Amino acid sequence: MAGRHTCHRGHRGRRQRAGRWRTDAGTGQRALREAGLIDQFHAIARRAGQDMRLLEPDGTLLLQEDTPDDAPLDRPEVDRADLRNLLLDSLPEHAVRWGHVFASADDGLLHFADGSSATYDLLVGADGANSRVRALLTDARPTHTGQNIVELGIPDIDRTHPDLAAMVGRGNYWVLGDGQSLAAQRNGDGRVRIGLSFYRTAEDWFATSGIPFGDPAAARMRLIELFTGCDARFTALIAACDDTVSPRSITTLPVGLTWPSRPGVTLLGDAAHLMPPVGQGANMALLDGALLGLALAAHPDDFPTAVKEYEREMFERTSAAGRQSARVQETLMSPDAAQKILAFFRSGRM
């Protein structure tokens, strides 16, 4: 927060990593209610995104949940780009200044990579996993979990591959087991986003995996080889993907990370509590922003008190979420992951 109203962002325009976000009623949706945006959110959220199909690698269907048309919007899906635009459009004009890459901060002055500067009352590091602001508060850095993900996708699947579209359904399609996973997810633009997960401990696994990411067709063939022990329907999903092939290593911050409160600086979202991508991170980030805003509104003339109040609650809440996310991630990559996740859905206990 530069001054009291302006947010500087490092990238120009509204580019956003593709994908969807599942909103939780008690965290992400709570934040949207606090911002007065819940009705607009409901207008773009997809109830059908709550559908779930869970399978084992041999093709055995363990669970199919189809959401009734009148089901409550407890955890609907929304495309991240749509949500981002909703949030940006709710801000006053000129509240966001694009193209300002953060370089450093000292004595109430922000310095940007282009040589410009701006004053601030409170600097909120909301700059993600590789936050530059984080270094002002802690030496903690993200570390590799051993999990690696390759993201692919099938555009306009209902027209191009209607058989695969029917198989995936309207929401989430999970194939889990043998230390690997295939997750297919519907996006609002007709694309199905597919994530292939592998557990490999080597930090440079992508460099030594033999997957030629510079050659999308060859990369798809190599990925199919890694899933040849699975039902042929799953490798058909990989074969149908387009040439967008994106590898990502999954990193996390230490669970329970805290820091001594410092006047004028704090963190939220992945900058503060990077955790495995199992559905908690974005919800926690939105709630962080809402609760920080409420704390500042309650103490408009005492930012240090507001920051301490926010951080105290955030540390406790996100530590619990981080522990749960780590357990879920470990389960997802276990040999009998599908059976364990089925038991979790039935009992609610991980």
Image: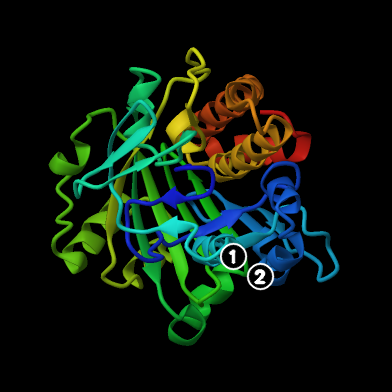
The amino acid sitting under disc 2 is Ile
Residue sitting at 45 percent across and 63 percent down?
193
Q: Which residue is mark 2?
A: 44
Between tags 1 and 2, which lies in front? 1
The amino acid sitting under disc 1 is Leu
Whether residue 146 appears in this view of the structure is no
- Which label is found at residue 86? 1
Q: Mark 1 or 2 closer to N-term?
A: 2
**61 displayed left or right of 146:** right
Residue sitting at 43 percent across and 60 percent down?
194
Of residues 189 and 95, the one drawn nearer to the viewer in this rendering: 95
Secondary element at image label 1: helix
Q: Quadrant of the C terminus?
A: top right
Dot 2: within a 10 Å radius of its alpha carbon, few (fewer than 14), some, or many (20 or more) residues? Answer: some
**Residue at the limit of the structure toward the bottom, as seen here:** 159
Residue sitting at 73 percent across and 64 percent down?
66
CB contact under 8 Å: marks 1 and 2: yes
Q: Position of residue 271 (x, y in %)?
A: 43, 34
Q: Position of residue 333 (x, y in %)?
A: 46, 35
Colour option used: rainbow
Q: Position of residue 43 (x, y in %)?
A: 71, 71
